[in-house]
C-alpha cells in the first residue's frame, strides 16, 4: 500500500508538470505521454481499493475470501489504459488533419526527460519492493513503468523533428506513443484474462509436483491444480500412499506434503491434499465416482 501511495504521488506530480508544459507548447506527443502517465497513476487507485477489500476475512458467502477483488481491479485498469490510448490517438489524428505549430520546444524536451525520470524512479521502487514481498504483479508493474519511461523519451524525438523543420514529427510521435500504449494494453488485458481463467505458470505446477513426489510416504502424484486468489496461490493435489497405512498415518503424509508445498512454493497460502491408497491390486477406490468425472 505504501508503494502504491508513493508511486501515485510521483506519477501525478510528473503528469501535472507535463500538463503545464503541454498547455504552453501544444505538443500532442507530450499530450499522449501525459495521458499515459495519468493513467499509470490512476491504476494505483483500484489496486489500493482491491488490496484493502482483499484483507477482509472469508465469510460463509465468500468462502475463499475477497482476493478476487484484484481481478476486478485489473479489468478497471485495462479500461483506463484503453481510454488513454483512444484519447491520445484521437488528438494525434486531429493534429495531422489540422497541423498547428508547437511552441517552447525546449520545454517539450524537458517534459520528456521529466516523464522518463518520474517513471524510472517508480519502476525501481516497485521492482525492489515487489521482489522483497514476492509480488510478481508489483514487479511487472515496475517493468511497465520502466517501459513508459522510454516512451517519454520519444517526446524528445518529436521536439527534435519539429526543431529540424518537420512539423508533422509531433503528431506522428503522438501516434507512435498511442501504439506503445496499445501494446501495454494488450499485455495488461492478457494478464487479467489469464487470472480470470485461473491460468498458472506450468513451471510452477512442475515444481509443485516435484515437491510432493519427494515427500516421504508419497508413492505417486495424481491430479494437481493451482489457482491465484488475489496475489496468493491455493493448490489441490491427489497423492498415492501405501494402502496398509492407517488413517492417521495417511493423514500425516498429506499434512507433510502440504507443509512442504507452503514452505517451498512462493505465495502459496494453502493446499488441500487428498490421499489415495495404492491397492489392494484390482481395487478401484473411486468406482462410485466414475460417472461423475
Image (cartoon, rainbow, N blue to C red):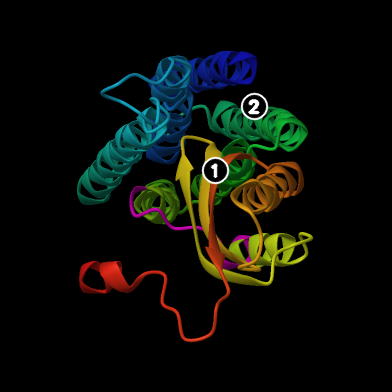
Q: Where is residue 187 in the image (x, y as percent from the top left)?
A: 44, 54
**Which stretch is magenta?**
196-204
- What residue appears at the point 27 percent right and 74 percent down from the top-left corner? 290
- Measured along the vertical axis of the image, is residue 171 above or below residue 110? below
- Graded by Cα atoms within 10 Å as few (under 14), some (14 to 19) or many (20 or more), the crowding at tag 1 reads some
Q: Where is residue 67 in the image (x, y as percent from the top left)?
A: 43, 29
- Graded by Cα atoms within 10 Å as few (under 14), some (14 to 19) or many (20 or more), the crowding at tag 2 reads many
Instruction: Determine the CA span between mark 1 and mark 2.
Output: 32 Å
Q: In this view, does 255 lie to the left or right of 89?
A: right
Q: Is residue 220 magenta?
A: no
- Residue denoted by label 1: 233
Name the one closer to the observer, 149 or 171: 149
- What residue appears at the point 48 percent right and 17 percent down from the top-left corner? 55
Q: Residue furthest bottom?
A: 282
Q: Is residue 252 left or right of residue 42?
A: right
Name the one closer to the observer, 36 or 262: 262
- What residue appears at the point 68 percent right and 42 percent down from the top-left corner? 262
Name the one closer to the observer, 126 or 159: 126
Name the one closer to the observer, 264 or 116: 264
Residue 87 in view, yes or no: yes
Residue 155 in view, yes or no: no
Q: Does the magenta stretch include residue 199?
A: yes
Q: Tell which circle, 1 or 2, labels the residue nearer the N-terminal end.
A: 2
Number of the front mark, 1 or 2: 1
Q: Position of residue 93 (x, y in %)?
A: 24, 49
- Residue denoted by label 2: 118
Q: Is mark 1 on a helix, strand or loop?
A: strand
Amino acid at each position: 500500500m505504501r508503494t502504491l501511495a508513493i508511486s501515485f504521488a510521483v506519477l501525478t506530480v510528473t503528469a501535472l508538470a507535463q500538463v503545464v508544459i503541454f498547455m504552453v507548447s501544444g505538443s500532442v506527443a507530450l499530450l499522449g505521454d501525459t495521458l499515459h502517465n495519468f493513467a499509470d497513476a490512476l491504476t494505483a487507485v483500484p489496486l489500493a481499493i482491491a488490496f484493502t477489500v482483499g484483507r477482509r476475512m472469508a465469510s460463509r458467502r465468500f468462502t475463499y475470501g475477497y482476493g478476487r477483488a484484484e481481478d476486478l481491479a485489473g479489468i478497471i485498469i485495462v479500461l483506463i489504459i484503453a481510454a488513454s490510448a483512444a484519447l491520445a490517438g484521437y488528438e494525434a489524428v486531429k493534429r495531422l488533419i489540422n497541423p498547428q505549430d508547437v511552441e517552447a520546444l525546449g520545454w517539450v524536451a524537458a517534459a520528456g526527460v521529466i516523464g522518463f525520470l518520474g517513471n524510472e524512479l517508480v519502476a525501481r521502487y516497485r521492482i525492489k519492493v515487489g521482489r522483497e514481498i514476492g509480488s510478481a504483479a508489483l514487479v511487472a508493474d515496475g517493468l511497465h513503468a520502466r517501459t513508459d519511461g522510454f516512451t517519454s523519451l520519444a517526446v524528445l524525438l518529436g521536439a527534435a523533428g519539429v526543431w529540424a523543420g518537420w512539423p508533422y514529427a509531433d503528431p506522428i510521435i503522438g501516434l507512435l506513443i498511442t501504439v506503445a500504449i496499445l501494446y501495454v494494453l494488450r499485455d495488461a488485458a492478457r494478464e487479467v484474462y489469464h487470472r480470470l481463467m485461473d491460468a498458472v505458470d506450468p513451471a510452477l505446477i512442475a515444481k509443485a509436483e516435484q515437491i510432493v513426489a519427494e515427500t516421504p510416504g508419497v508413492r505417486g502424484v495424481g491430479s494437481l491444480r493451482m489457482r491465484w486468489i488475489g496475489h496468493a496461490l491455493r493448490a489441490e493435489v491427489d497423492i498415492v500412499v501405501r494402502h496398509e497405512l492407517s488413517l492417521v498415518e495417511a493423514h500425516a503424509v498429506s499434512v507433510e506434503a502440504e507443509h512442504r508445498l507452503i514452505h517451498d512454493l512462493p505465495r502459496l497460502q494453502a493446499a488441500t491434499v487428498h490421499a489415495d491408497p495404492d491397492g489392494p491390486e484390482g481395487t478401484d477406490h473411486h468406482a462410485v465416482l466414475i460417472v461423475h468425472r
